[in-house]
Image: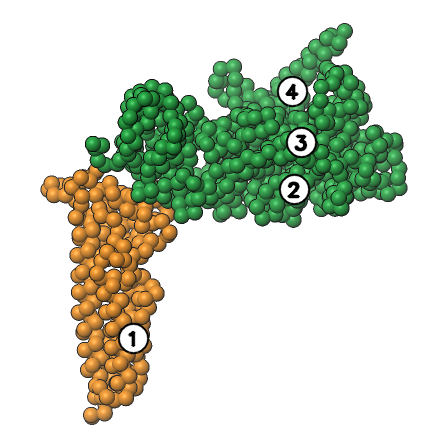
Amino acid sequence: MKNIITSSIAMLVILIGFTSCNKGNNSGGKSGALASNVAERVYVAPGEYDSHYAFLSGGYSGNVTVYGLPSGRMFKEIPVFSQFPTSGYGYSEETKPMLNTSHGFIPWGDAHHPDISQSKGELDGRWLFINENNTPRIARLSLTTFETEEIIEVPNSAGNHSSSFVTENTEYVVAGTRFSVPIPQRDMPIKDYKGNFQGALSFISVAPETGNMDIKFQILMPGFNYDLSHPGRGKSHGWFFFTTYNTEEASTLLEVNASQNDKDFIAAINWKKIEDYVNNGGGTMIPANYAHNVYDDETHTATSTMKKEVRVVNPIDVPGAVYFIPTPKSPHGCDVDPSGEYIVGNGKLSANLTVHSFTKMLDAIEKEKFAGEAYGIPILNFEDVLAGVVEQPGLGPLHTEFDGKGNAYTTFFISSEVVKWKLGTWEVIDRKPTYYSVGHLTIPGGNSGKPQGKYMFAMNKITKDRYLPTGPEMEHSAQLYDISGDKMELLLDFPTHGEPHYAAAMEASIIKEQSQKIYKLADNKHPYAAKSDADTKVVREGKEVHIYLTTIRSHFSPDNIEGIKVGDKVYFHVTNLEQDFDVPHGFAVIGQNNSELLVMPGQTKTSVWEPKQVGVWPFYCTDFCSALHQEMQGYIRVSAADSDTPIKWSLGEDIE
Amino acid sequence: MKKASIIMIIGSLLLLGLFKFPLWNIMLGAPQYPDPLGMNIYIDGIKGVSEFDLQNIDGLNHYIGMKTIPKAGEMWEFSMFPKVIFGMALLGIIIGVLGFLDKVSYKFFLGWFILMSVLGILGMYDFNNWLVDYGGNLDPHAIIKVTNPDGSPMSYKPPLIGFKKLLNFDVTSLPHTGGYLMFVGMSLTLVAFWLGRKTSVKKTT
Ligand SMILES: [Cu+2]
């Protein structure tokens, strides 16, 4: 019986999906003069710059991709949670610690929601934060070097989905668990989920100068699923809102069993209140085990530290800090408008869009008008907090962003469209189809107090028929709309990489100005750096051999190395002596079991090579660096394990 | 004569600008260098316009076998020029002061100018010789050898003054702030001479 129900629901969804696709195709086409006008508006002439940066999460690629708007051109992929052979990230000795966790070395991640740091509610372009869903982690990327600088693992969490959103002065980045789990983890029957599992909402403090992250406290919430979140801002600064589903606390066939309650909750958290409580010694330190990985720009090296405890807070110990707002029905996105007054709960199985009022919420709290409680947490009355309802806007609402002009834009997954509606009057102003099955959407600055609302782009889950086919799998597609007028205008389709869930975007100026062009060799504090050809050497330490190697157009120094033996562990420490923008050199040696390296000007990177065969083996530069790039090569001689070939190295002479 | 002497002193003082500002500037632009590389030539050494320009110019020049740009200690000129400039400025000031006190005639102003011009021409001649050597004295093992149509090896000598195309590089060589200050200063000593002569002619008639 259950199977019949699920399959018929699936059929219904598929049918809806198809009809809406057709509708979309018919209304979407424009041609002739209008189309060429649109082309001009996304065209960025050679040598000119895009007006906006967009940072898209890579989903299962574990990385972040950088795009330009309005051109939709991809500029860079920044490795974050996944190994990246293009640069050696996660393979080089310096970056392996970045992927360390309490579960050991994890070479991949599921990156979801990037968010740019803010000051006074405005994007400041210093850092980008992004969550990893599978092995709960939060990363901080520098928007000066476009490198991952820090990754912190989140204990007691599972499916780190309602992350990584920052408060309006980047006081905190949150990591809310999607799955509730036994805390502390233990061996217990899964059927005893209800009442025994808990959901941890982690508040990670961000040091104002360095950006360094530290888990300040975790709130141990009832065992629901915490899906998405957004910070309050302006008048609601100091609060954080989390959508929940599975308030049924089911552990099996959630598709049906977590869709029974007519309303789930938005959890409203007064984090300032909990922060005060914690600053006054509140909460309990409990044993934990989680990795904190920090990359140092001067040693070009990451270190991983295992932390052993974390502070947890039971919400009923802090009266007045946590409330539940009933929200229909399995809400997904939880979005707060730029003024901080409206909290949009997108009930993905609801026909209507529900908007809550922060003012009404405070009022109801003050009057102690509660409908009941769940695990000691007061539940507010739906009607008391309701600001308004957008009636029948579409099917399957997911996410909402704002343009700063009083309008909201919501994606509808099932009906494949973006709907523009007005805050306050709740009327639908415009709708445009997407191709197809849209997830998140982004307006530059849309997650701040000051949206920079000229563009909006939608990130779609299905791409078929939009581009030349590439076999059964296609890259996902994003679509760029001009939202400066009353009606949205579709400007451009552009393919994305991985599965972008959410994106953060902002005007280019601040980031472009602060972008770093080289690493200064003089500041290189890598312990194995060779800052000139005179510093190059080969040092044997037992069975380890350290090669201090330099690169400059167009040679390695040294380029003849002898005295290596089978069974040695050979460390190639490669320092790029260039001090010129965009002139990396590569390093590859035959039989390398990890990856090549791409070394930026002034940087040192290390690759370990364990030769297993006697011979004279070449190494070479993998990045076409100059006219003599092809000649940028060297040889390393490997002798038998019991040989007595002495260590020798040279450049520009024959070894005698 | 007092006015002329003051102008003589000011003109000589302007030479001291060379201790702060570069005498000459050479810029090298190319498609792959949208922000051109540049070197500023001071009387006591050569510096890059941007921090790493010299290293990057040397890096490029090694393909065609040019020597690296000389460091301050590698050329006698860089220890001699400051002495000459300081000496000439001091001499000019002394002449000016003596003129002010009517101890020397305005003709000394012209004498200073002629001496400075001779030294300047010698300096330019020396500078040009260095450019010829820098651009033409190439490593015989150079990676890239380009010949002129007549088969002689191409010289990469930057222009002494003005613009020249060297392979794919646009090379511009012009005086810089210190150089202009020196030219203005020298012109002022000529003015001082002319003024001094005018006043002395008036006196005698
Ligand atoms: Cu290379």
Circle 4 sits in a helix, a strand or a loop, which is it? helix
**CB under 8 Å between callouts 4 and 1?**
no
**In green, which chain?**
A
In terms of secondary structure, where does tag 1 sit?
helix
Q: Which class describes the residues within 10 Å of circle 4: few (<14), some (14-19), or many (20+)? A: many
**Count of all numbered marks drawn on residues in the image:** 4
Residue A288 badge: 3
Find numbered disc 3 in the image and state the secondary structure of the residue it sits on. Answer: strand
Q: Position of residue B72 (x, y in %)?
A: 27, 58
Residue A587, image quadrant: top left
* Residue in view at x 69 percent, y 32 percent: A287
Which of marks 3 and 2 precedes in the sequence?
A: 2
Confirm or deny contact between disc 2 and disc 3 (CB under 8 A): no
Q: Amino acid at mark 3?
A: Ala
Q: Are marks 4 and 3 in contact (CB under 8 Å)?
A: no
Is disc 1 on the same chain as disc 4? no
Query: Which residue corresponds to mark 1?
Result: B11
The residue at which mark 2 appears reads as A205
Find residue B169 and report its image quarter: top left
Q: Which chain does the numbered disc 4 sit on?
A: A
Q: Position of residue A241 (x, y in %)?
A: 73, 36
For the residues tagged 1 and 2, is the chain the same?
A: no
Describe residue A236's horizontal placement relative to residue A82 as left or right: right
Nearest to the eye among marks 4 and 2: give it. Answer: 2
